[in-house]
Amino acid sequence: MKGGERAIENAHRLLAEERRGDPAVPELALAQIDQQLGLAVDRVMIEGSLHDRELAALAIKQAQGDLIEAVFLLRAYRTTLPRLGVSLPLDTMRMTVGRRISATFKDLPGGQILGPTFDYTHRLLDFDLGDTAARPGDASEEATVVETPEPPATLDPLPRVVDLLDREGLIEPVAAPPDDEPVGDLTREPLQFPASRDVRLQNLARGDEGFVLALGYATQRGYGRNHPFAGEIRQGEVAVELVPEELGFAVEIATIAVTECQMVNQFRGSAVAPPQFTRGYGLVFGNAERKAMAMALVDRALRCRELGEAPGSPTQDEEFVLYHSDSVEASGFVQHLKLPHYVDFQSELVLVRDLRAAAGAVPKP
Amino acid sequence: MSAYNFAYLDEHTKRMIRRAILKAVAVPGYQVPFGSREMPLSYGWGTGGVQVTASVIGPGDVLKVIDQGADDTTNAVSIRKFFERTTGVPTTTRTDLATLIQSRHRIPETPLHAGQILVLQVPIPEPLRWLEPREAETRKMHALEEYGVMHVRLYEDITRHGRVAQTYEYPVLVNDRYLMRPSPIPKFDNPKLDMSPALLLFGAGREKRIYAVPPHTRVRSLDFEDHPFEVEHWDRPCALCGARGVFLDEIIVDDKGGRMFACSDTDYCARRQAEGAIGPNGA
């Protein structure tokens, strides 16, 4: 293939044209993507490991809505950013919640807060939603704006369901790691095995939602089963605090939306430990409950060795899970098969022809 | 909703599902594969139960929908609304007045009577699934009535804990032939399966299986002579209606360890209270 340079230029021009589509249709603004495709923005921020709604919206626009490509774009930008400091651990007890549910208790302190959810919608296409965009500035669109109730935000610390169980000793205790223990970061240090839990969780949070979801589902169907209950899912805004060295005290630098899932899992006990519930944990940016839940299931499955369970499924195989969760790595390697492999393939051709001739199958050309 | 047929599904689909149900009734406890459809609610929310209900419901039915024993839980409300919208049949919270009851995780406390149909939503129909993840294997085990592994599994519990540590989806043998997972009802409800005068239908949408316990069929919870099957019991009555011998929910009332126990079956509890029964915390 000669003239590669011109071919690439042409391909880029065609791509730009495809991205824009019919120029008669108004171009998407980043604010529209942020506001009306907010869950796509959340997913790209989560898997892109970067909290910036505007850049994520830009990535989605540039990638023509291909979210894996958008994650790639955001990652490639993130990698150029300096890491200025490490925040204090997020205190999700002090979350301003928009949604908070527990599947293990009918009612609990702080209450069940349903919030915005697809859960109990009937998946019937709402034809009224169609085509409003074709009538920009239509008065009817404004007329349909209804007064939405103020989200039931609460500022008092909301007790966690797992802490209520902890008080009775029904769930494994978790000691907070010492303050001076560094937090793993697999974007700075290569993944090593056995991986620590913080690194595993980081990997799962960055991991492709489809992959993590499928593995979480597999644990439910018997491949590394861990008897899960959704102890609590909460979604809302939390403060990010940083202690600048020159100040010596915590300063709030941002408020971000997160979704947290605490799975309560059964543990049958061992020779040395009586039966107790165990934990699986998921935390992601924005509103992404499905991802947080799947993450918590896989987190628990990967804890099998720590809990003395015999690993027998891919979901419990840390190398299998952590090496294959990343969509940027996976997408790159799968698609690199499109690159020229003439030389290797030629060598194979020669060999296969020789072998077939030796076996008397066909004459050598 | 005129774009949709009565009870959402088209009549061909209903007929296919009714055939699966007939087969399930003819072979009690046997899991009949069926062409489960994608439904307008999410897998895991009761797509199997909804398809079974949609296939057997008629304009003369009175429908009750419960989840965790309660009529007012979000998913029960959602499914009830779905059928109100797509069929227009009357609904009720009264167990005794309903002709058709769709339930998730409970069998009502009020005894069912002949002519009623109880539809249970099932997430994982295969009782042997945690012992063998492969479907081809488990079907063979059912065909050969090879259920020893389940007895071993229960026996392991006894050696480890001194009792069977299975609290819900406790395995049962139906009509002395098929091992069946009674959906995840608490084992407390297992005795209600045995010789039930009502028809019990089990629908698993994602796993595409339907099975049934026809009226007056023997359903035995697996146990051992020296470790007979027993159900959970509470050492206190319902805080609201004072009922004993019913399944109680634990409700956390503060973050200092305070808790209350009340009937999981809201209809049963409300009707007892209406008749003047009162518990320790009752109004």
Image (tube, rainbow, N blue to C red):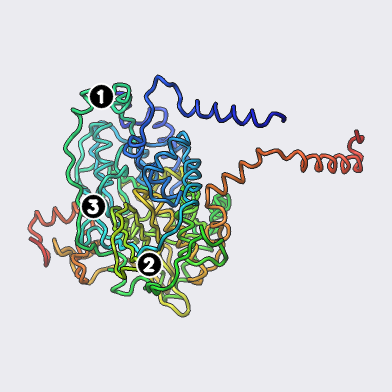
Q: Chain of mark 3?
A: A
- Within 10 Å of disc 3 (Cα), the crowding (few <14, some 14-19, many 20+) is some
Q: State the SS at label 1.
A: loop
Label 1 close to label 2 by CB (< 8 Å): no
Q: Nearer the viewer, residue B19 or B158?
A: B158
Instruction: Looking at the image, tell me whether mark 1 or mark 3 is earlier in sequence order.
Output: 3
- Which sits in the foreground, B76 or A133? A133
Residue on which disc 1 sits: A137
**Rounded to the nearest whole Å, what is the CA distance between mark 1 and mark 2?**
68 Å
Q: Which residue is mark 2?
A: B229
Q: How far apart are labels 1 and 3 at the CA level?
A: 35 Å
Residue A255 place in picture, x, y as percent: 29, 54
Q: Chain of mark 2?
A: B
* Residue A259 on image: x %, y %: 34, 53
Where residue A344 sits, quadrant-wise, is top right
| Residue appearing at x 36%, y 68% in the figure | A245
Q: Residue at x 44, y 55 (%)?
A: A205
Camera-nearest label, 1 or 2: 1
Mark-to-mark CA distance, 3 and 2: 39 Å
Q: Which residue ends up furthest to the bottom in the rendered image?
A: A272
